[in-house]
Image (tube, grey):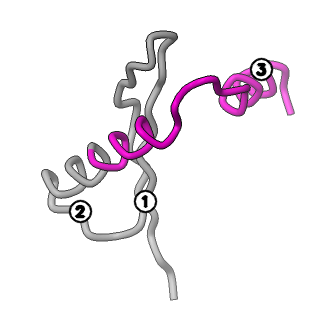
Amino acid sequence: MCAAIRKQKTKQFGEVKINLSEVRNKMGEVAVSVAKKIKYSGAGTVEFLLDSEDRFYFLEMNTRLQVE
């Protein structure tokens, strides 16, 4: 694993000092809203960035294709 990816993963999984349930619930509402707005009905993830003021920003949506 290269150093840049290792550093990114450290930031992604770093210590969190916020009220997770409140922020997580709001992120969930936004994620569902994004999926509904584009009429997406499959599996996927929506990623956000969280700043030091507990504000979050949409980063990306990763769709998952199910292969059978």
Q: Quadrant of residue 53?
A: top left
Relative image position of residue 33 (x, y in whole percent)? 20, 50
Q: Which residue is mark 1?
A: 44
Disc 3 to disc 2, how far (Cα)? 32 Å
Would you say the magenta stretch is mainly helix, strand or loop?
helix
Mark 3: which amino acid? Lys
Left or right for 52, reference 27:
right
Report helix, strand or loop for mark 3. helix
Mark 1: which amino acid? Gly
Left or right for 67, reference 16:
left
**7 drawn magenta:** yes
Q: Which residues are magenta?
A: 1-29
Which residue is found at the position 23% from the left and 62% from the top? 40
Report helix, strand or loop for mark 2. loop
For residue 7, the mark is 3
Which sits in the foreground, 20 or 44?
20
Which residue is found at the position 43% from the left and 59% from the top? 44
Above-or-below relation of 7 to 30:
above
Relative image position of residue 63 (x, y in whole percent)? 41, 57
Circles 2 and 1: CB atoms closer than 8 Å: yes
Q: Which residue is mark 2?
A: 40
